[in-house]
Image: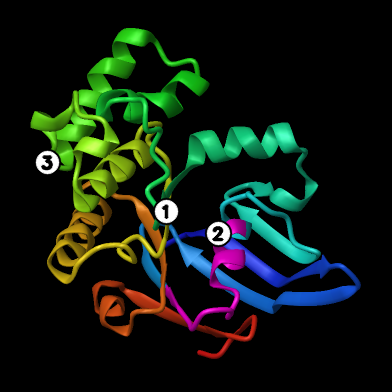
Amino acid sequence: MSVLIKLEGVEKTYHVGNVEVCALRGVNLSINKGEFLSILGPSGSGKSTLLNSIGCLDVPTRGKIHLGEFDIGELGESELAQIRGKKIGFVFQSFNLIPSLTALRNVMLPMIFQKEDPQERIKRAHHLLGLVGLSERISHRPSELSGGQMQRVAIARALANDPEVILADEPTGNLDSKTEKEIIELFRNIHKKEKKTVVMITHNLGLTKYAQRVVHLKDGRIEK
């Protein structure tokens, strides 16, 4: 497998008032194209900071992050936004759907930002909602969906622009155990059938069995 994402000596420091908080401490990590990687760690271990750094939502204080041919530390905000829009799909614990939009329009939204043809947007959104098992819910708004259904819409939205990488931040954290298993199986299918690189962060040890590789993070450092 070829390396898609590479972190070299990545550190991230935040300033909260007069206090300096070091969230990442010299992280070295390579993620292969087509890999399903799980990042495991307790609350406060730096998991979300690491995911945000990989996803070009944040840039490191020190060190380098390469996403394909790009060194994200050398890019401006508009260039980072383009990479996020085209190469990365995000799935969050809290779903982050637009309450006033239907499932179909929530999935179409990323394609609007990339100026995709309107008819192609509709066609692809229908396809993706079918892929996640929600063909009968395309006209429903988030308030009319269960937690598991909202997360399925969020996953379909993450796939909207056919990204190389899916980044999932505690994607089952708000779900019951039955729905949790259904969502994880959906991620496995996306990884295998859609050939996506999946990076999932979690504090749930039981979920790591679904990944091909597990990285253990503690106090901003990779333990193993």
Q: Are marks 3 and 1 in contact (CB under 8 Å)?
A: no
Residue 186, image quadrant: bottom left
| Residue hosting label 3 | 133
Return the residue nearer the eye: 197 or 156. 156
Here the colouring is rainbow
The residues bearing labels 2 and 3 have C-alpha atoms spaced at a distance of 30 Å
Q: Are marks 1 and 2 in contact (CB under 8 Å)?
A: no
- Residue 45: x and y in percent read 58, 80
Residue depicted at x 26% and y 25%: 104
| Side of 161 relative to 188 (left or right) | right
Residue depicted at x 26% and y 82%: 206
Q: Residues within 10 Å of mark 1 (few under 14, many from 20)?
A: some
Magenta span contains residue 51: yes
Question: Which amino acid, by three-letter code, is at mark 3?
Answer: Gly
Residue 98, image quadrant: top left
Return the residue nearer the eye: 143 or 62. 143
- Residue 130: x and y in percent read 14, 34
Residue depicted at x 12% and y 67%: 178
Magenta span contains residue 167: no
Q: Residues within 10 Å of mark 2 (few under 14, many from 20)?
A: some
| Residue hosting label 1 | 92
Give residue 5's mark.
2
Question: Which amino acid, by three-letter code, is at mark 1?
Answer: Phe
